[in-house]
Amino acid sequence: MAVKYATAVTVATLALLATSALAQTVYRYKDSQGNTVYTDKPPAGNGTVQRLEIPPQPPQPVQPAAGGQSDAEKKLLEAANRRTADLDRAAEDVVTAFNALRAAEARRDEGVELQEGDRSGRYLSRQYFQRRQALELDVRAAQAQLDEALARRNALR
């Protein structure tokens, strides 16, 4: 009976860890202007596409009945639950950083449009270029956060 129960706990733990292996695919590449782009569909004919995987949110771990578990089994289950929770947090950080990058890229793209006061005669004003530079720095910072979140998540895998 104890062997069957230990096997059931091991199978349940492995099933929980296996759900982290299923992933959503995201592609990263540089566009013609040198900007890094993240998308769920790779562009045709671009040989510099890098495939990244973002794991889906795994279901909450199921706690088997505590009765009859040895201390080693309890520790193993606690470690598996901690790892699952750490992976969940890391996956949430990746999704949050990915969404922040998309928002920063959208703001940068909208910032190209001229606004009132952006022209000084025939020339564009310093204000216009400063705004564009600030928006580009926001995109780079968001991209760095995404890269950091992906590295943390991959280190936990």
Image (cartoon, grey):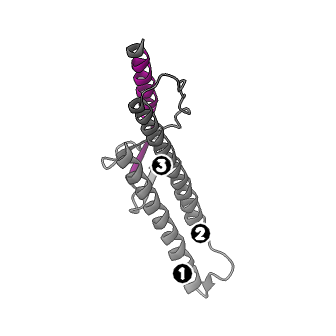
Residue at point 41%, 16% (across, down): 2
Which kind of residue does numbered mark 1 sit on?
A: Gln
Q: Which circle marks residue 138 in the picture?
A: none
Left or right of 132 on screen, residue 144: left
Residue 25 visible, this angle? no
Q: Are marks 1 and 2 in contact (CB under 8 Å)?
A: no
In the displayed structure, would residue 99 be above or below residue 44? below
Majority secondary structure in the magenta region: helix
Disc 3: which residue:
90
Q: Position of residue 109 (x, y in %)?
A: 56, 63
Please tell me which of labels 1 and 2 falls first in the chain: 2
> What number is the disc on residue 130?
1
- Whether residue 20 is situated above or below residue 106 in the rendered picture: above
Q: Is residue 82 above or below residue 100?
A: above
- Which quadrant is the N terminus positioned in? top left
- Give the residue furthest to the right: 116
Query: How many marks can you see?
Result: 3
Residue 115 found in image quarter: bottom right
Magenta-highlighted residues: 5-29
**Which residue position holds label 2?**
111
Q: Secondary structure at mark 1?
A: helix
For disc 3, the neighbor class at 10 Å (few under 14, some 14 to 19, many from 20) is many
